[in-house]
């Protein structure tokens, strides 16, 4: 049996599906029973509750062979780092109380850096928190920028006719599809092929710039002239707040964007066959196109 946190999210949902398809026993964790039903129908057991509730989590983690842990985003958080620490502590306490032996933990590129990386500092704290646990084998997957982040351009394309964010358009960096992360998570859960505390980088199929990614998407959606525009940091922060993201989270996202623009993530980790994953931006363009076209159907409805 495997316990999956964030089971209705980008990565957790795909991990649950992979394991269920393989006939494994899965306990899916989330706050909403209705959203977990899709997995229950396929044979999973639902654990409905909040990651901040360590007693609930202890029960959800008890009797499993391995756990997939992650700290979900909370775009409304007034103090995002405090929120991350609260969830992280609750997870760590529950792992200990439930005597879990193997943990696959979702981390991020930049978790090796002490500051200047926005929300990633919270994932660094969580790596250290889990590294302090005795008798638990943990692998931290330091994933690069999710290709799914690029879906956030769709409202801007619909409203303004261009894509944009605070990230430099011509800066090449690693991008990964979350289905590739989920495949690695599932493999580590089942094989439990890590000892003590380990770190693995996951860098996607290749490095590329956002301009290149948007050009691929533009061709795929029949807008070959689609442009990407870098938005100044203060305007980007204001735009995020206007979208309902808290000022603190917006500030941290801008800090992360600056770190990406300055190339600080790339320094420590050369690309290898092991940290390269299969899905290309050209393949991900199908997902982008599906989301783009359904945003039009939804608007028309
Ligand atoms: N975006 C990137 O480029 C990037 C790169 C590297 C690492 N990361 C890290 O990846 C993580 C996000 O992964 P993701 O995209 O798979 O997440 P996601 O899609 O946002 O899913 C998170 C899930 O967690 C559940 N959740 C939220 N708050 C909860 C709570 N208090 N208690 C219980 N469940 C809760 C939600 O499900 P319910 O609403 O159903 O409860 C949600 O579906 C973050 O830690 C982020 O820092 C992101």
Image (cartoon, helix red, strand yellow):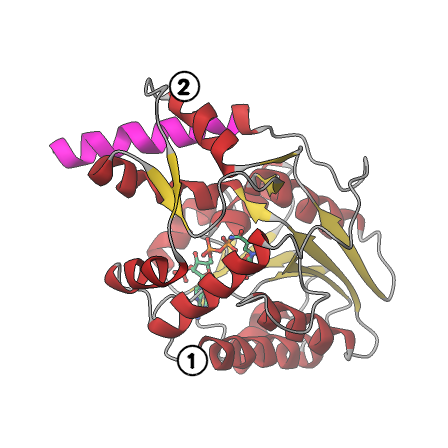
Residue 41 visible in this rendered orientation of the protein = no
Is 176 or 110 nearer to us in this picture? 110
Which marked residue is nearer to the observer: mark 1 or mark 2?
A: 2
Left or right of residue 87, residue 124 in this image: right
In this view of the protein, which residue sits in the foreground, 184 or 236?
236
**In magenta segment, residue 288:** yes
Question: Height in image: 261 above or below 18?
Answer: below
**Most common SS among magenta residues:** helix
The percent position of residue 149, horizontal first and vertical second, equals 46, 46
Check disc 1 and report its element: helix, strand or loop: loop
The numbered dot on residue 79 is: 1
Query: Label 2: which residue?
Result: 219
Instruction: Tell me where residue 105 appears, x and y as whole percent.
Output: 67, 61
Q: What's the residue at 57%, 48% (across, down)?
A: 145
Stretch in magenta: 283-301
Q: CB of residue at label 1: within 8 Å of ligand 1?
A: no
Taking the view exactly as shown, the residue that stands out farthest to the left is: 301
Is residue 102 one of those drawn in magenta? no
Residue 19, image x and y in percent? 62, 43
Q: In which quarter of the image is the N terminus?
A: bottom right
Q: Is residue 269 visible?
A: yes
> SS for tag 2?
helix
């Amino acid at each position: 049996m495997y316990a999956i946190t964030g089971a209705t999210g980008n990565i957790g949902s795909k991990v649950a599906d992979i394991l269920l398809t393989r006939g494994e026993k899965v306990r899916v964790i989330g706050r909403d029973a209705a959203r977990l039903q899709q997995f229950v129908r396929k044979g999973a057991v639902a654990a409905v509750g909040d990651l901040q509730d360590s007693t609930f989590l202890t029960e959800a983690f008890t009797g499993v062979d391995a756990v997939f842990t992650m700290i979900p985003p909370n775009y409304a958080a007034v103090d995002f780092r405090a929120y991350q620490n609260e969830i992280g502590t609750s997870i760590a306490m529950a792992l200990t109380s439930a005597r879990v032996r193997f943990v696959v933990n979702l981390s991020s590129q930049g978790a090796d850096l002490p500051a200047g990386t926005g929300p990633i500092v919270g994932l660094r704290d969580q790596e250290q928190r889990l590294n302090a646990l005795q008798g638990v084998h943990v692998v931290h997957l330091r994933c690069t920028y999710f290709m799914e982040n690029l879906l956030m351009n769709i409202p801007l394309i619909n409203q303004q006719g261009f894509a944009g964010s605070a990230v430099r358009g011509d800066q090449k960096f690693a991008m990964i599809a979350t289905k590739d992360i989920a495949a690695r998570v599932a493999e580590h859960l089942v094989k439990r092929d890590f000892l003590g505390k380990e770190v693995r980088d996951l860098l996607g199929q290749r490095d590329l710039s956002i301009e290149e990614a948007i050009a691929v998407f533009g061709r795929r959606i029949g807008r070959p002239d689609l442009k990407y525009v870098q938005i100044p940091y203060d305007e980007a922060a204001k735009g995020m707040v206007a979208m309902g993201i808290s000022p603190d989270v917006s500030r941290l996202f801008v800090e992360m964007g600056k770190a990406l623009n300055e190339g600080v993530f790339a320094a420590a980790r050369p690309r290898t066959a092991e940290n390269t994953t299969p899905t290309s931006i050209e393949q991900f363009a199908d997902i982008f196109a599906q989301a783009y076209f359904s945003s039009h159907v939804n608007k028309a409805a």
